[in-house]
Image: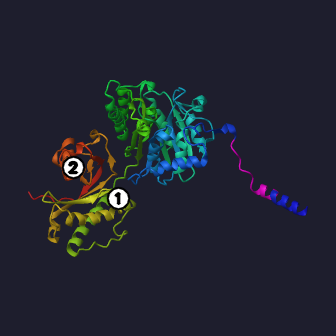
Amino acid sequence: MKNSGILLAVGFVFIAMFPMIQQPEKGEVRPSILAGSWYAAGKDELRQEVQSYLKNSPPANFYNELLALIVPHAGYQYSGLAAAYGYVTINDQTITRVVILAPTHRYPIQGCSILKVAYYQTPLGMVEVDQEVCRQLLEKKLFSTVSAAHKEEHSIEIQLPFLQETITNSFKIVPILVGDIGSEDYQTIADALKPVIDDTTLLVVSSDFTHYGSRFGYQPFAKEKPENLAENLRQLNFGAAEPIINMDFDAFIDYQKKTGITVCGYRPIGILLKLLPADSYGMLRCYYTSADITKTGNYSDSVSYCTICFTRGRELLNNDEKGTLLRLTRQTLETYLQSKNFPQVSLNDYNITPKLMERTGVFVSIYKNGELRGCIGYIQGRVPLYQGVMENTVNAATRDTRFKPMTHEEAKDVHLEISVMTPLRKVQNIKEIQVGTHGLYLVKGNQSGLLLPQVATRYGWDRLTFLKQVSLKAGLSEDAWQQGAEIYVFKAQVFEEQREPKSP
């Protein structure tokens, strides 16, 4: 009896010191409506399902902060792989808030609706809602709570298991359903959202692309030959993806009106385009249709899925940083040509800033008497930027097979130029190529070629000439770009040594 009393007393102390965790009330939780149908019902099974898609998605070849994703919202057997292509890019980034913009499918609403709950539930656990932010938004114009719209809607919940599996820290969500809005409302909604978006906020737009077939009431290619349908759908979807990637709100909305394309989340996408910073960088990560997944070849009744991600554009180097790289380039050139050694670099003496430590693609070009004398670089960031500049100064001077290696005596007669690249973005339509802004990188088989943006400007090339020239640069025929080639674009910050004034 004494022992029992002791145990009872100890138990009492334990409860007093560590009260039981308060469970949310039933009314505070939006329960899962998709478990066991759109995705697996069990916790372990769902985790395994999500992880299998993530493991089959290639990592992104960019290093900058992820700002936003456009991902599909069908059942995982159809859209899981496409969604994974987006969520895998989170890559251990610290995200404390996720704003989800999603369309309504079954219950029409005006403006935006936010459900007044504390949690959304999935088999993986509770996802906390940022109630304070939601309260602030509900005080704004065009925001309200239409509970009936959330009852059977899948477009928000379908994103949650991927967020739970890819965000490694605790986070809250701001789940917003977007209904019918007018042309002026996009900006109004974006202005309401901007104050709650900070450096640890991720924007997620939940949207499928073209719903094609009689059951969707959309058959713009009904009179076309069936064998052309897959390509026609591809071009239709890429026609919508192009202005999205280029963050051209007007062009995207005009395209939707002109084609009637059944992108169910086109309004949330429009809001996103009003929210993204001007220096954002967009890229298409994945495209396929439900017919590709089922392997039936029946594109006449199919849904298309696109995954698009936006990263923060690389912050431009300031004048001091550009000067540092140019000094390093010049000293490296002269030291190596004289001694075959790289100069010793003190990070403090050279004021190597954090931006100069980033890993990014960079090319060094050498000119003599106005003509190219050597040009080599790294397409992607292999080493810190300052180190890449030094290595490619030597490469351009001594290893460009188009020219004889430079001598030390030549160093005083050459002019140096540096091109710091943005990440590569694969193009689906050559109309995406902006001559004078984009450089080109072409890959076909085992051969590849790259031309910097300034090359097209220097020679006055148009888009087709640029494509022909990059094909030739790859050692291929000038029409090689037309079939079987992968074409990438990139931008570059280009700066050069100050030229000596010419004698009159």
Can residue 497 be seen by looking at this rendering? no
User: Residue at the location (35% across, 70% down)?
Assistant: 349
Question: SS at mark 2?
Answer: helix
Foreground tag (1 vs 2): 2
List the residue tagged with mark 2. 470
Image quadrant for the C terminus? bottom left
Q: Is residue 377 left or right of residue 21?
A: left
Work out how far the residue at label 1 is from the one at label 2, CA to CA, in angstroms: 21 Å
Three-letter amino acid code at the position of disc 1? Gly
Asked where in the image residue 302 lies, by quadrant, the reply is top left
**Is residue 103 shown in magenta?**
no
- Residue 325 versus residue 155 in the image, above or below: below
**Furthest residue in direction right, as rendered:** 1
Quarter occupied by the N terminus: bottom right
Point out the tag, 1 or 2, that comes first from the N-terminus.
1
Q: Which mark is residue 28?
A: none
The magenta-colored residue range is 12-24
